[in-house]
Amino acid sequence: MFRKVLIANRGEIAVRVARACRELNLEVVGVHSTADDAEVLRRHVDETVCIGPGPAGRSYRNAAALVEAARKTGADAVHPGYGFLSEDPDFAEICAANDLVFIGAPAQVMARLGDKSTARTLMREAGLPLLPGSLEVPGDVHEAARLASTVGYPVIIKAAAGGGGNGMTVVREPGGFARAFTETRAVARAVFGDERVYVERYLERARHVEVQVLVDDRGEGIHLGTRECSVQRRHQKLLEEAPAPGLDPQQAAAIARDAVQGALAVGFRGAGTVEFLVDADGRHYFMEINCRIQVEHPATEMVTGCDIVREQLRVAAGLPLGLAQQDVQVRGTALECRVNVEDPANGFRPAPGRIDRFLPPGGPFTRVDTHAWPGYVVGPHYDSLLAKVVVWAPQRDEAIARADRALAEFEIAGPGVRTTIPFLRRVLADEEFASGRYATSLVDRLLAGAPSERR
């Protein structure tokens, strides 16, 4: 095992990783920008380093500053968390060139899977089911339009280098395709520096189901069951649960089997997530592989008892996984609610400001991952995630009641500050959600005030 870990991230995930390091008796280095108050982080690390100004490109995405911080403090490993440089193969190679262990997937694997079009081809070769669509990036709008006609509308245009719900456009009829193609390429170029896009069939009523996988250097790969991530706004998740409800055992087993098969086929290592779409008839289709810890990993930890960050650290140190597939037992239901500083009534627009009152919930089987405190200032530079409320119960209806109780206890107040808590409670109270047969359309329906689609 390495001796000292630098956490190349901020917020709740930095605190989460630091806790896992502490339990392994590892020294921990935290980093922060000039825009971040690192008061909570300092409680969990041995030392902190300021890595630059507020904009992420000059701090948390500044590979040179992060490597210099690691060298200055004597760190011998870097944990990237999620977002920022967590899936950047260049950063992983820079770490290796500076004798730093990158706690994540191999750089060459990230490079191949980071291109969503290439990932589709790799997964087809591995035998995973795909939605009809591109296997190569279309050369121009005319080629893409012909492919869309072959696939059949509606289609979705996606950025090949995309992620985080950005660079996606649904097109429901041929007349709107050319404009959508041009606009999506422009977004892809602006956000990812890569204008390539591809086309695939769009499922109107789909479920977003993912599988947590762990793979070590010996090629041993396991899964930790399924997660349901269909409560989304603009392709970004708001609430997740484990395991995914409403799947029969054969469906769940097939999805999990494909996830491990796909990860092993590309030489994956570490903790990753294989994401699928499931149609109304229960058929599943590969969507993408994320080569990092996920925001929603605590839901899986609650139902399996597996510390996923600990396993990441073990694998990065060259140790075998601490458990085998037969050791994985999924018990009960866990729900994770993302408390974002956003105003759902205004298109989930960020609502930053100073938090004067901050009282997280407690109680049985209730976990809150956060980096905030009374007096914390939510600034404009970073993601709006403030806290994650994660609950567990033996039965799903009990977990829903517990999540609602916990959210009702959570007090967050400050001038101009709005959070997603009221909207999350609307989701928990919805009949379609309670049925366990909901789809990615649920949030849009709630925002539109439409009746439940419970079946």
Image (tube, grey):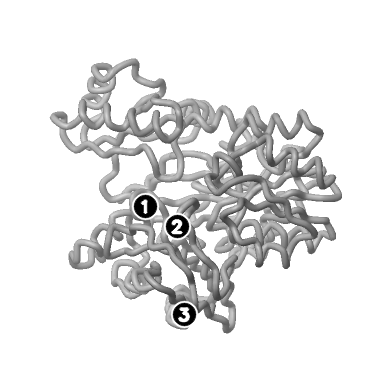
Rendered position, 411 above or below 66 = below
Q: Amino acid at mark 3?
A: Glu
Q: Residues under labels 1 and 3: Cα distance?
A: 32 Å
Earlier sequence position, callout 3 versus callout 2: 2
Answer few, some or many: residues within 10 Å of disc 3's Cα (few below 14, many 20 plus, some between 14 and 19).
few
| Relative to 138, 33 lies left or right | right
Q: Quadrant of the C terminus?
A: bottom left
Earlier sequence position, callout 1 versus callout 3: 1
Earlier sequence position, callout 2 versus callout 1: 1
Percent x, y of residue 416: 37, 69
Q: Residues under labels 2 and 1: Cα distance?
A: 8 Å
Residue at the spot 36% in from the left edge and 50% down from the top edge: 282
Secondary structure beneath dot 3 equals: strand
Quadrant of the rendered image containing residue 218: top right
Secondary structure beneath dot 1 equals: strand
Residue at the spot 55% in from the left edge and 63% down from the top edge: 299
Q: Which residue is mark 1?
A: 207
Percent x, y of residue 260: 59, 42
Quadrant of the rendered image containing residue 58: top right
Q: Amino acid at mark 1?
A: Arg
**Mark number displayed over residue 28:** none
Q: Which residue is mark 2?
A: 228
The total of numbered circles placed on residues is: 3
Q: Are marks 2 and 1 in contact (CB under 8 Å)?
A: yes
Q: Are marks 1 and 3 in contact (CB under 8 Å)?
A: no
| Residue nearer the viewer, 63 or 238 | 63
Q: Which residue is mark 3?
A: 411
Q: Residues under labels 3 and 2: Cα distance?
A: 27 Å
Residue 78 in sight in this render: yes
